Each structure stands twice: as structure tokens, then as C-alpha cells.
Image (spheres, rainbow, N blue to C red):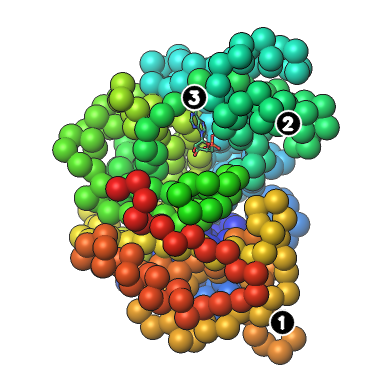
Amino acid sequence: MKILVVGKGGREHAIITALTESPSETEIFCFPGSDAIFELAKPVKADGVDSLISFMKENEIELCVAGEESYLVKDQGLANACEAAGIPCWGPPKESAQLEASKEFAKEFMVRHAIPTGGYTPVEDIEAARTAIDGKYPTVLKFDGLAAGKGVAVCLDEAMAEEFLDEVLVQRKFGAGRLLVEEFLEGPEISIFASVVDDKYQILAPARDYKRIYDADEGPNTGGMGAVSSLEMFEGDLRDVIDETIVRPTVEGLQKDGLPYRGFLYFGLMLTPQGPKVIEYNCRFGDPEAEAVLPLIEGDFASYMEMGAKGKLQPELIRFSSGWSVCLVSASAGYPASSRSGDVISGLDAVEKASIFHSGTKLNDAGLFETAGGRVLVVVAGGETRQEAVANVYAESDKVTFDGMQRRTDIGIRNF
Ligand code: AMP
Ligand code: GLY
């Protein structure tokens, strides 16, 4: 099966690794990819959705997998263009990807379908924002558009709120767009993933992501500094409650609204004392959650996605192994405010009992991997218990170092 994966980070590296480990014979291509990914997949030259479609037609690609979200809403939309070209695509069309691209669209969808979420007020300017905040802290401020995970601020006081409002509504750091003032929700977070195929869906293993840069959940939000996954995280009736109150109403809502969907749907949830509430939808797998969840999948992941993209969900093609999986992100100096490139990474070959997925690296002239982004790489290891998986991932990742490296020491430990 000839497959094109779109994306370039640790998530796409993990997806491609899972595809190559599938029993189905695969030939994998990746755009834009990375040097590490090109050890498993062939590079593609393209500069947008149209040229990707031309490439897929010329090379008789049988499945397009949207790893990241940006191409889903770019130009005419990757999935829309695939559909027009008759190429099965794992990833939703542009109109449905608004669930991720527009926070206001997502909120209106949830309200329309009675899906539990925090209250919100959309605002255009700083005065309206101040009125909506109404002196109540903590408050949550979200830029309504794609901002690479950086458009959200949980503000503990007025000074923090004013700083963010200035960046977003005055300096327009993320460009034009509205802002949502959201009710602050409390509780542990959980990331839920479902494979959605029209009116059918399958809930995958859940994960917990660690979003803050420093230990003890301190410092600014990042794209994610690590994640832990296990079916055991569905304690008691949690899985059923999430299914009945959130996942099923979402899939039914998509159907009622005439929004086609084939692909992974990610539910960022807060487990509040009043029950699970949706923080956000993403129309793709999480990163770094994918790096923790995908190694737990056994079976024929390639055929699973191919059949799903063609309209047939076949849950029996995959299984989740028991035990736990923990992934740990190493970030470069300066992250998340900035990032530093060019620090040579040592110890990659010494890692034996863990997998390494590259998020932001490149090969230098000497043939060595060096940093080339904020999140640099992800080490993932498993274990029968959470404690064992944590011990394994830390033992293995200690072997990998580079100048300025930032890595949390409490991934898989905190919030359990
Ligand atoms: P988002 O990009 O919407 O997922 O937000 C990023 C992070 O900000 C989430 O993972 C939460 O940790 C936090 N967050 C977002 N919305 C809320 C909320 N309404 N209440 C509390 N924390 C939130
Ligand atoms: N880990 C959060 C995300 O992928 O958006």
C-alpha cells in the first residue's frame, strides 16, 4: 500500500513507525517530513495542497494521512482535494476541521449539541474583554485561530490578563481574529482520541499530556512536554461517561450538521467535579500523546486507516497492549518563548529499550543530528506498571543529551 503522511514532527514520526510495523506491506512517503523521518519514508517535493494532489495522482498513492492540522484548512482543504481526486484520506474536510481551526465554531457546536464545556464570551476588542472578564480570576483567554498551541493563556490575575490582551488584541501577535473569554475549569486533564468514520467511532487509549514547561506544572504552556497513556487510565465508569456525554453526542452532532468526518478526533477534556467537560477539539492526533499512545497499538494499523478512509471502520484490526507507555520530550534552550538550533545531540545510539521520535532535529554536515526546533525529540518507553514505564523512560532518556536541553523530571508521576 502506498501511503503519504503529511506533517514533520514527532507525531508523524510515530505514525510512520506504526505504519512500517504493520503487517501490511507499505511504501511510505512524507511531506514535508524531516531527516529522521526520511530514514523510514521517502521525501516528497510539494508547495501546497495542489502539488501534493498532483504527486499523489502521479505516484498512485492509495492513502493520505493528515498528521498535522494545517493542511486540512489550507487552500481548498487537503481532504476536500483528496476526495475530488478520488484518493482516500484519513483526516476531515475543511468544513469539519473548523472544530479545531475556530474555537468559536467549536463552542457553538457544543452548545447546539448539549456537549458539556465551559461558558464563554467572544470579544473583538480590549474593552469588551475586560467587561467579559469582570474581575473574575483565574480566567482563560483564547485567540480564536490556529496559534500553534500558544494562543491560550490561563490568567491568574489582572496583570497576566492585561499582558495577553495587549499581545493579542493590540499588537496582534497572531494576526486578526477574535478572542474568547472562557470560564476557568478545574480538575485533571485527559486527552481522548477517537477514530471517527461517518456515524461510527472507536475510542482509543487515553493519555495525559503535560503542557507546562517546568516540573510541578509551572511556567508557560508549551506544545506538550511529555505524555502518559494506558487503558488503565479509564478508571471505573469514566470511559462510559465520556462516551455517553461527549464522544457519542459529538459524532451524532457531526452527522446532524452534515459535517463529514473520517480521521482521528481528539477531545481535550477537563475532569471537573461536575463531570468531564470539553476544553477543545483537535482534528488529528495529539503531539506528544501520539508518541505515547501509538506504541501501545498492535495489529494492522495501516489497513485500519486505509479502510477507515474508505468509509469502513474496522475496530478488530487493532488492539491495545496492556501496561503503560510514557513519552518524554527534550526541548531546546529558550523554549517555549524561542528555540535554539544547531546543538549537536549525543547518545542517540545508546538508547536500547526505548523508541526515539524526532520533533525538531536535522542532520548536520558531519552526519550528526542537531537541534532544529523547540521540541527536539521524544523518548518513549513502556512497562507493565506506570512506575516501571516511568523508570524505563528516564533511564533511557538520560543517555541522550545536548547543550541547553530542557526536560521535565515528573512526566508520568505528577497528577496520578
Ligand atoms: P487549548 O489550546 O484550548 O487546549 O488550551 C491549552 C491548555 O490551557 C489546556 O490544555 C488547559 O491546560 C488550559 N485550558 C484551556 N482552557 C481552559 C479552561 N477553560 N479552564 C482551565 N484551563 C484551561
Ligand atoms: N498535546 C496537545 C496537542 O497536540 O494539541
Mark 3 C-beta to ligand 1 under 8 Å? yes
Residue 315 location (% of width, % of height) = 26, 49
Left or right, 30 with reference to 197? right
Asked where in the image residue 191 lies, by quadrant, the reply is top left
Asked where in the image residue 186 lies, by quadrant, the reply is top left
Residue corresponding to mark 3: 184
Measured in 3D between alpha carbons, the distance from the residue under mark 3 to the one under mark 1, in whole angstroms, is: 45 Å
Residue 408 location (% of width, % of height) = 49, 60
Residue 124 location (% of width, % of height) = 73, 17
| Front disc: 2 or 1 | 2
Residue 354 location (% of width, % of height) = 38, 75
Which quadrant holds the N terminus?
bottom left
Measured in 3D between alpha carbons, the distance from the residue under mark 2 to the one under mark 1, in whole angstroms, is: 39 Å
Residue corresponding to mark 1: 364
Residue at 45% in and 49% down: 216
Above or below for 51 versus 370: above
Report the front residue among 284 and 20. Answer: 284
Which circle marks residue 163 in the picture?
A: 2
Mark 1 C-beta to ligand 2 under 8 Å? no
